[in-house]
Every structure is written in C-alpha cells, then in structure tokens.
Amino acid sequence: QVQLVESGGGLVQAGGSLTLSCAASGRTFSALTVGWFRQAPGKEREFVAAVSWTNGLARYADSVKGRFTISRNNAKNSLQMNSLKPEDTAVYYCAAKSAYDLAVTGFDSWGQGTQVTVSS
C-alpha cells in the first residue's frame, strides 16, 4: 500500500473550475493505477476517473466525461475539474492499486479525502 494525500478542494460557483492533487509518500506512482472517487452526503462512494501510470490510459465516469481530466505528473496525480455543477459536491478521494487495469475495483490505498462544494 501507499500513503496518499489529497489537496485542492474548496468552494466554487457552478460553472467554475478546481484542480485536485494527490501525492504519494513512501513510493512513487510508477506501476500503479491511480483513481479518484467521490462520496456525497447520504450517497454511496462512486468512481470518478482513473489513469494507468504505465501507459497513461484513462477512464471516466459518464457523469464527468468531457468536464474532468485526470493526469499524471512525476509523483503527483491531478484531477482538473471544469464546468462544475452542484451535483459534483462531494468528498473526493484519491486511491491507488498495484495493477495496470482501469477497473473501478481493486483499489487498496486511499487518501483522507478533500471536500469540494459547488454552489448554485
């Protein structure tokens, strides 16, 4: 497992943008798949996006496709969120797994989460 720390959450108006970052401590992101999940109050945690550190392939939830972009840069993973909507409000979690696939399951390292609030 790897320790993950998210940053970049906050309050933004609908239509605005935020960038979340995820840093790994104790090791790099190489040979990992890194993803973002979110959990809104009263709802189950849901998959947002994932990227394979090895080949850069990415996968997105339909609800964020075209608005969010996941990227990798050295030892940090970023989630660029544009055209934010009130329904994007949630705690966002960075996650990682020692696998090359982009399946939404199998993530075994999690960050503590960062709050994103989108006002209407």
Image: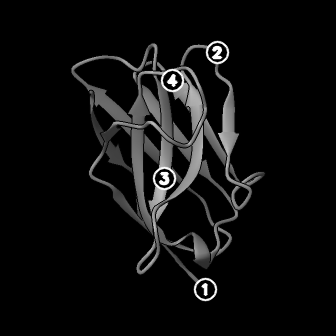
Which residue in the structure is indicated by mark 2?
A: 55
Which residue is drawn at the image coordinates 64% and 67% (left, top)? Answer: 84
Task: Kindly identify which residue carries mark 1.
Answer: 120
Q: Amino acid at mark 3?
A: Phe
Q: Are marks 4 and 1 in contact (CB under 8 Å)?
A: no
Which residue in the structure is indicated by mark 3? Answer: 37
Q: How many marks?
A: 4
Q: Residue lying at the far right in this picture: please name it.
A: 66
Is 111 on the left-hand or right-hand side of 49? left
**Amino acid of disc 2:** Asn
Displayed quadrant of residue 64: bottom right
Spatial separation of the CA atoms under disc 4 and disc 3: 19 Å
Label 2: which secondary element: loop
Percent x, y of residue 28:
35, 17
Q: Are marks 4 and 3 in contact (CB under 8 Å)?
A: no
Q: Nearer the viewer, residue 100 or 20?
A: 100
At 34% across and 36% down in the image, what residue appears? 108
**Residue at left offset 51%, top offset 23%:** 73
Q: Amino acid at mark 1?
A: Ser
- Quarter location, residue 5: top left
